[in-house]
Image: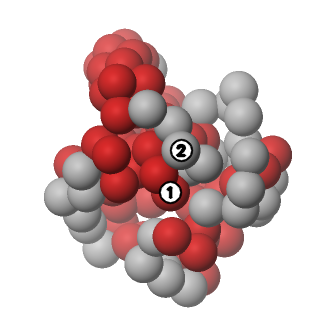
Amino acid sequence: MKETLNHFPSIGEGEFHFCALLNLPPSPSLWRGNGALPAAWYLARNFAGMRLAELGSAAGDAAYSAVSMAISRFEKRLKADRDLQRRIKAVRKILQL
């Protein structure tokens, strides 16, 4: 998977804080399987208004249907996981969303 942060608007230090708050490595190529990509897609879709196809393209040509399913699964997890809710709230605060 190619580096994807270059496709999103620069958020400066927010990138580092996002990774730190979610206990993730700072490189998107290391995010596979740890929930970071669906979290980023959720935030970009719901707070930056990005289209599913744009998100998939930025993540190495993922199909829009795969992006949609990942976001749906993330939203279900978010409803059930208070710690994840707290971390997403912290990321939103840092990014001023």
Taking 2 as reference, is 95 above or below it?
below
Residue at the spot 81% in from the left edge and 46% down from the top edge: 30
Taking 78 as reference, is 44 above or below it?
below
SS for dot 2: loop
Residue occupied by mark 2 = 61
Count of marks overlaid on the render: 2
Taking 32 as reference, is 57 above or below it?
below
Residue at the spot 61% in from the left edge and 61% down from the top edge: 4
Task: Tell me if mark 2 has few (under 14), some (14-19) or many (20+) residues whose alpha carbon lies within 10 angstroms of its own.
Answer: few
45 left or right, relative to 41: left
Location of the C terminus (image quadrant): bottom left
Residue 38, horizontal then vertical, whole percent:
48, 36
The front one of 9 and 78 is 9
Name the amino acid, label 1.
Answer: Ala
**Cα distance between the residues tagged 1 and 2:** 7 Å
SS for dot 1: helix
Residue 48, horizontal then vertical, whole percent:
24, 63
Task: Tell me if mark 1 has few (under 14), some (14-19) or many (20+) residues whose alpha carbon lies within 10 angstroms of its own.
Answer: some
Picture disc at residue 58: 1
Question: Residue 44 is drawn in which quadrant?
Answer: bottom left
Residue 8, horizontal then vertical, whole percent:
46, 70
Q: Is residue 78 something that shows in the picture?
A: no
53 left or right, relative to 57: left
Q: Decide: marks 1, 2 in contact (CB < 8 A)?
A: no
